[in-house]
Image: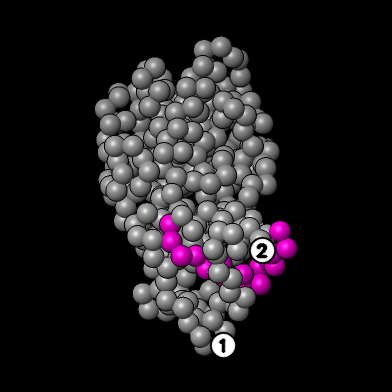
């Protein structure tokens, strides 16, 4: 069977991309591995009408609503290969027959790479976060920190005082210049130059000397990697984002490869549920219009 569109990734952006295509009665296959980026978080914030809800519930409700459309199919599996065909594209899926479609939407998300600090990964999503807009308010203006991973950490460090008393752990990632030090001081950000050795207890930041600081929340700008190899296999171009490579797209979410679209965290710097949903809606509508107005 030749689908109109195969969507690789069935989280928020992939679900959102599928919806306008389903409502245009296009034949859509969603291939999803079942690994959401925010699977460690108990609550999702900032998404209108869903603020504070369980992110797994939001995704499940989205899938249930999508699957009421008769032209949509869902395949739980891992897409491991992609190639162009005379009719469009062929996707290879682990443990299943290959599937073909006229268009591809890449919505596989990214993998967060945390600094190699003992105790950090175990608290990811519960006490350690990447987005203050998603998690800052609940810290109730308490004691918060940020572990620098590069000079780009300055951006987040200057934002964080709106959510609490902020300490920037430089962690030998970079050294602020005179102008940056002035900006940090103006925002009331405290600097800690001693290297972070581990994270203990509820959220105790233990430094190399053994000294510790207790925090209510910790932010870490992670390095991200595109979770699926398909974009590279298809020859899509990438851009170096603030914290890792993302797939290059235009304003309509088209990649550099004709017929291939990308949305969500794989195709934009920064990530949140509302941004992913909006990105997916644009990708889905643009992909539908390409089916109507363009040849392969």
Which residue is situated farthest in the top direction here? Answer: 293
Which numbered disc flags the more N-terminal residue, 1 or 2?
Answer: 2
Q: Is residue 294 located in the magenta-colored stretch of the structure?
A: no
Query: Badge 1 local density, few (<14 within 10 Å), some, or many (20+)?
Result: few
Q: Quadrant of residue 147?
A: bottom right
The residue drawn where x is 32% and y is 52% is 43
Residue receiving disc 1:
209
Front one among 134 and 264: 134
**Which residue position holds label 2?**
181
Judge by depth and name the residue closer to the eye, 273 or 96: 273
Q: Residue 176: within the magenta?
A: yes
Q: Is residue 222 visible?
A: no
Measuring from the top left, give residue 134's x and y in whole percent. Answer: 41, 50
> Which SS class for mark 1?
loop
Is residue 143 at least partly visible in the picture? yes
Magenta region, residue range:
163-179
Residue occupying image coordinates x 47% and y 22%: 285
Q: Quadrant of residue 84?
A: top right
Q: Is residue 272 left or right of residue 68?
A: right
Residue drawn 46% across and 78% down?
A: 213
Give the vertical position of 221 relative to 36 (above or below): below
How far apart, in angstroms, are the residues tagged by discs 1 and 2? 24 Å
Q: Nearer the viewer, residue 120 or 134?
A: 134
Quadrant where the C terminus is found in the figure = top right
Element class at badge 2: helix
Q: Up-down: is 146 above or below 274?
A: below
């Amino acid at each position: 069977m030749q689908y109109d569109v195969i969507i690789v990734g069935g989280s928020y952006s992939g679900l959102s991309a599928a919806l306008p295509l389903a409502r245009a009665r296009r034949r859509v296959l969603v291939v999803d591995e079942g690994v959401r980026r925010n699977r460690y978080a108990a609550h999702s914030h900032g998404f209108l009408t869903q603020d504070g809800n369980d992110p797994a519930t939001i995704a499940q409700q989205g899938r249930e609503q999508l699957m009421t459309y008769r032209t949509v199919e869902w395949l739980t599996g891992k897409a491991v290969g992609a190639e162009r065909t005379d009719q469009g594209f062929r996707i290879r899926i682990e443990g299943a027959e290959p599937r073909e479609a006229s268009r591809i939407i890449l919505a596989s998300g990214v993998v967060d790479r945390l600094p190699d600090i003992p105790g950090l990964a175990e608290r990811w999503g519960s006490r350690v976060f990447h987005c203050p807009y998603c998690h800052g308010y609940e810290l109730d203006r308490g004691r918060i920190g940020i572990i620098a991973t590069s000079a780009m950490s300055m951006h987040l460090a200057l934002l964080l005082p709106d959510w609490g008393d902020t300490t920037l752990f430089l962690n030998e990632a970079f050294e602020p210049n005179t102008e940056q030090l002035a900006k940090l001081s103006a925002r009331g950000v405290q600097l800690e130059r001693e290297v972070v050795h581990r994270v203990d207890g509820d959220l105790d930041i233990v430094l190399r000397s053994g000294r510790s600081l207790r925090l209510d929340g910790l932010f870490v700008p992670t390095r991200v990697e595109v979770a699926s190899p398909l974009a590279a296999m298809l020859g899509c171009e990438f851009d170096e984002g603030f914290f890792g490579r993302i797939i290059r797209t235009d304003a309509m979410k088209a990649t550099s490869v004709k017929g291939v679209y990308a949305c969500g965290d794989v195709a934009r710097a920064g990530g949140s549920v509302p941004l992913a949903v909006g990105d997916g809606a644009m990708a889905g509508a643009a992909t539908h219009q390409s089916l109507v107005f363009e040849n392969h």
